[in-house]
Image (cartoon, rainbow, N blue to C red):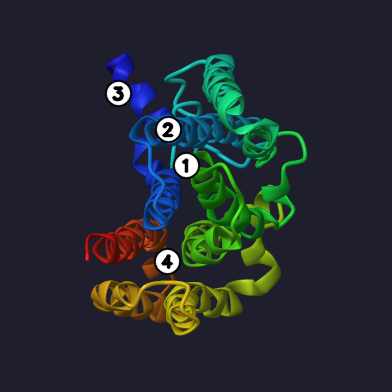
Amino acid sequence: MDAKYKWFIAFRPWSFTAAIVPVTLGGIWAAYQGYFNVGLFLLTLIGGVLIQAGTNLVNTYYDYKNGVDTEDWVNTAPVLIKNWIEPYKVLFMGFVCFGLALAIGIYLMTLRGIVLLLVGLFGILAGYHYTGGLAYKYKGLGSLLVFFLMGPVMVWASYYVQTGFHSWSAVLVSLPIGFLVSAILHSNDLRDLEHDIKAGVKTGAIFTGRQNGIKLYYLLNILPFACVVVLVAFGILPVWTILSILLAVPEAVKIFKQARQGLVGDWASIETLEQKAAQFHFQFGTLFALGILVAIWL
């Protein structure tokens, strides 16, 4: 098998939208307020994707080392289970990605100050400790912490790079994206629930149980719509954002129907729920950003 293909699977580039969406939203929110630099945006985007890539690689390494990924159960990156790549190379490449992201952070610090570097370091450390070190994913904190890291933290950081100052509005507009990225992780936990129990790790889905976990999944997909409506009502977001996210409603209905099948006992429907959640995160985030862009143009 071609080495490039093996590394492609290891990096999991299909997951990069989880970083691209919040970075883009932060940049567009800054543009809505009159601040936007293409070069700084691209650097921020590259940095965010590098942190995501590093997290993916480190996660693959520690899931393998901790016995979470096994020959009879691996759904995302089977490169170590199938001996496609040596484990130390995967971990090393993860550190390379983190190092490159840190280099970008140091450069941006020279423009925006040390606060931005500290936020970047926090993101890198959180990416490593997802399954390495503190391994907060195995303690049932994955979905909760990812909500903050790939919602408010990433959107705010992207906004701060553009403007050079703090605004709570950037945190507020990040909430819909935070809920949806949590939905991705939670659907992953629902899919892996029985295997994770056997592996001896704790996830949010194990704490809630499958039935309540599916209900939580409903909530995580409903709250983004509610957040946008409330933020428009309080004059924080332009009304165009409501009109744009309405286009996401049909897809949301499909996801709810699929999750409902799991709720009534059709557990096979949960198998593809993570993929659907990631697609919906990207679709909703794109429509959300387009709504703000329309308000800028008009």
| Front residue (pair 151, 269) | 151
Q: What kind of residue is marked 4?
A: Ile
Q: Earlier in the sequence, mark 4 or mark 1?
A: 1
Find the distance from the CA under tag 4 to the CA under tag 1: 40 Å
Residue 73 in view, yes or no: no
Q: Which residue is mark 2?
A: 40
Circle 3 or circle 2, nearest the eye:
2
Circle 4 or circle 1, nearest the eye:
1
Find the distance from the CA under tag 3 to the CA under tag 2: 31 Å
Q: Which residue is mark 4?
A: 270
Find the distance from the CA under tag 3 to the CA under tag 4: 27 Å
Q: What kind of residue is marked 2?
A: Leu
Instruction: Please tell me whether residue 82 is drawn above or below residue 241 in the rendered image.
Output: above
Q: Earlier in the sequence, mark 2 or mark 4?
A: 2
Circle 2 or circle 4, nearest the eye:
2
Residues at discs 2 and 1 in contact (Cβ within 8 Å)? yes
The residue sitting at 39% across, 62% down in the picture is 277
